[in-house]
Image (cartoon, rainbow, N blue to C red):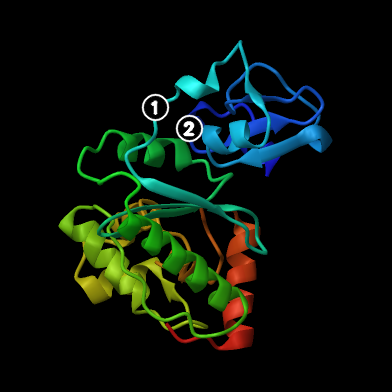
Amino acid sequence: MYRSVVGRPELDGLVYVAVRTTRIFCRPSCAARPLERNVTPFATARECVAAGYRACRRCHPEEIPPPPFAWRWIPTPLGTVLGAASDAGLLLLEFADRRGLPRELALLRRRADLGGTSARARRALDAADAWLEAYFAGRPPGALPLATRGTPFQRAVWEALRAIPAGETRSYGELARSLGAAGPRAVARANGANSVAIVVPCHRVIGADGSLTGYGGGLWRKQWLLDHERAMNLVN
């Protein structure tokens, strides 16, 4: 996980880098670059202090304001996933190395209506964690409450994605025709704006010629997910 978070200011306040050899903890964006084998990640500054670490005097991680949402790092067979939630449900579920994550987190941090780290938001993260565990184990994961924001067209595309059965795919053109949309490119843009990976299965959309085309989490993950769903015959 360390290599996925080091040097990334957008993750400040969402993970802390504690160095066992110096007993100091830093924000991910700190200029210090400890050896990975000496690092332990923590979710909060309070956890670092409780474990006996002191704050770095260079990056002052204890001064980072908390984000306006609940969050959790969830390990999966395809790498660590960051989940974020509000009282209304799941806001974000993305692989830590996704290129679009900084933009998505910046949008969430600017929102004032998310309710902070409430008990309901933490329960939404518990549900997301359980959903992913069932999915990767090959069991039907069931429903999951979402609280994502988008334009009416984006939301229509995301709902259409959730209607694609696991183990099947659709082309961008097929999805556009089913929605009466302007065309495949408009669907592709809405697909790329999806911030809830796997649960809203944008990986099930492929090119008209059967090629994988793009995927924010990486084409190798897209292929893995499609193979997994075909093998397990999952049901949403």
Image location (x, y in percent) of residue 235: 46, 87
Which label belongs to residue 183? none
- Residue at left 50%, top 71%? 130
Horizontal relation, residue 225 to residue 174: left or right: right
Name the amino acid, label 1: Pro
Label 1, on which residue?
A: 65
Q: Quadrant of the N terminus?
A: top right
- Residue at left 27%, top 56%? 87
Q: Nearer the viewer, residue 192 or 46?
A: 46
Instruction: Indicate the quadrant where residue 173 lies.
Output: bottom left
Instruction: Give the class, few, some or many, for how many residues have Cα within 10 Å of label 1's Cα (few <14, many ≥20).
Output: few
Q: Quadrant of the C terminus?
A: bottom left
Instruction: Indicate the quadrant where residue 123 lies.
Output: bottom left
- Residue at left 39%, top 33%? 66
Instruction: Give the class, few, some or many, for how many residues have Cα within 10 Å of label 2's Cα (few <14, many ≥20).
Output: some
Tag 2 and tag 1, C-beta contact below 8 Å: yes
Q: Is residue 68 above or below residue 209?
A: above
Q: Nearer the viewer, residue 95 or 23?
A: 23
Horizontal relation, residue 132 to residue 158: left or right: right
**Residue 209, visible in the rendered structure:** no
Q: Single out the residue that lies furthest toward the top.
A: 58
Label 2, label 1: how far apart the Cα atoms are = 7 Å
Label 2, on which residue?
A: 13
Looking at the image, tell me whether mark 2 or mark 1 is earlier in sequence order. 2
- Residue at left 58%, top 23%? 29
Name the amino acid, label 2: Gly
Residue at disc 1, secondary structure: loop
Image location (x, y in percent) of residue 126: 45, 64
Image location (x, y in percent) of residue 112: 21, 37
Q: Is residue 87 above or below residue 113?
A: below
**Residue 231, visible in the rendered structure:** yes
